[in-house]
Image (tube, grey):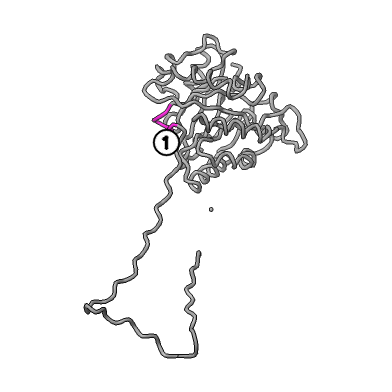
Amino acid sequence: MLVRRAVTVLTIAVLAGCGTDSRAPEKPGPSASGSAPPSAPTSAPPAPEAPAELPLGGTKIFPTYRVVAYYGTAGNAALGVLGEGSADKMLPKLRAAAKPFAGDRKVQPAYELIASVAQAGPGKDGDYSRMIPLESIQQYVDQAKRNKVLVILDLQPGRGDFLPQARQLERFLVQPHVGLALDPEWRMPPGKVPGRTIGRVGSDEVNRVSDYVSGLVQRHNLPEKLFVLHQFRASMLPEISKIQKRPGLAMVQHVDGFGTRSEKNATWDRLRRPRQFHLGYKLFYDEDVKRYGAGDLLRFKDVPELVSFQ
């Protein structure tokens, strides 16, 4: 089956002596009533800062919401439906596509924006991957915030490592509505070229990235973040059982793959790990044959909690 997709205050009290009188200061005596003078009032400790919330409220994504996303990158329709127009143009279409997937949950629209795009050539740094302009990412992040939409920044690192690319996006990841997706298809082994080889990533690398993002959530008092792993072959995540759960992350195994219903069913049945992850599912507008609708997915034995359209 052809497949695509994935911050002491040391307060020093200085008592300065005035003049040369060395007598010890007198202790305050009792008041006229004979009682001791009242003690100075103490100030209450500051209340802890309330955690930031998700766009539609709360701090947990699942099971409150079902996330429905448009996948793609800025200004490139060939890489997914999100790139067929500006965010303002695509949002009404996304809302309409997402609405039927509610079921027993609230629908949370999302943009899955490919932030680094795998390349056929090595580029200046030789990693076969190019980060789209940060200004473009900022536009999507800002527009999403105004419209109560989640953003999932998708990484295709080529011969590079996922973690350095994720760190480049920290200014976005510290925002409450922005999560991260790793796409092993585009994580190349040494000497291999994107588009000619289906990539893979080991559990150690995934765990380093998830630890980094989880740390951001804890340090910045953020709500739960989506942390998505794309997969359509077992070889893409060969050590999947060693991938660790992290506090503050809604970790999603997103099963990709286009084709007939029977082909997609076979991939879904072979790969999904509902005891380890929340589940995601991709629908392809052009490549799926008799593409599944919302009603079909809501009848799955393990209903996907993240659905994306490419």
On the image, the x and y values in percent for residue 113 come to 59, 28
Q: How many marks?
A: 1
Measured from the top left, where is residue 92 in percent x and y? 53, 19
Image quarter where the C terminus lies is top right
Residue occupying the point 56% across, 43% down: 208
Instruction: State whether the magenta stretch is mostly helix, strand or loop.
Output: loop
Q: Which residue is mark 1?
A: 60
Nearest the eye: 264 or 109:
109
- Which residue appears farthest toward the left when viewing the image? 33
Q: Amino acid at mark 1?
A: Lys
Taking 51 as reference, is 239 above or below it?
Answer: above
Query: What residue do we see at 54% from left, 11% from top?
Result: 260
Residue at the location (45% across, 24% down)?
A: 304
> Residue at point 51% right, 31% down?
150
Tell which residue pokes out farthest to the right in this image: 124
Left or right: 177 as drawn, with respect to 124: left
Residue 230 in percent (x, y) is at: 55, 28
Residue placed most toward the observer, 190 or 133 = 133
Query: How many residues crowd around disc 1 within 10 Å: few (fewer than 14), some, or many (20 or more)?
Result: some
| Magenta segment | 56-65
Q: Look at the image and say whether residue 49 sits in the magenta stretch.
A: no
- In the picture, which quadrant includes the N terminus? top right
